[in-house]
Amino acid sequence: VTVRQLAHFTTEVDLLVVGSRGFGPAGRMLMGDTAGKLAHVGHSSLIVTPRPAAPAPPEAAARSVGEPAARA
């Protein structure tokens, strides 16, 4: 999907949520910044979700929400 297609889609929705690849300034210079371009040409509100710093350890994902972590 291109920025142009996404920008057209923003005429039909109230909110568009896109993810950030998080490549940093050098990556944006080489590959472009979809979210940045959409912020300028889009017609709806835009939320950009950041890329996680690191994947969660498997034991953290297995815990239930609100369940305390096991103590060693």
Image (cartoon, rainbow, N blue to C red):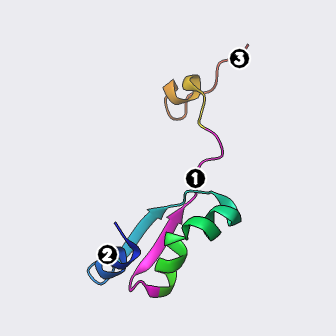
Instruction: Say whether marks 1 and 2 touch (CB < 8 Å).
Output: no
x 50%, y 34%: residue: 65
Foreground tag (2 vs 3): 2
Local SS, label 3: loop
In the displayed orientation, state which residue is furthest to the front: 30
Residue type at mark 3 is Arg
Measure how far apart labels 1 and 3 are at the Cα level.
29 Å
Say which residue label 3 marks: 71
Instruction: Say whether marks 1 and 3 touch (CB < 8 Å).
Output: no
Residue type at mark 1 is Arg
Q: Nearer the viewer, residue 66 or 30?
A: 30
- Residue 52 in picture, x, y percent from top left: 60, 48
Question: Per the image, is 69 magenta?
Answer: no
Question: What is the magenta range?
Answer: 41-54
Foreground tag (1 vs 3): 1
Label 3 CA crowd tier, 10 Å (few <14, some 14–19, many 20+): few
Residue type at mark 2 is Gln
Say which residue label 1 marks: 51
Q: Does residue 28 lie above or below 65 as drawn?
A: below
Q: Does residue 48 lie above or below 38 as drawn?
A: above
Measure how far apart labels 2 and 3 are at the Cα level.
50 Å
| Residue 33, quarter of picture | bottom right
Question: Per the image, is 48 magenta?
Answer: yes
The disc at residue 5 is 2
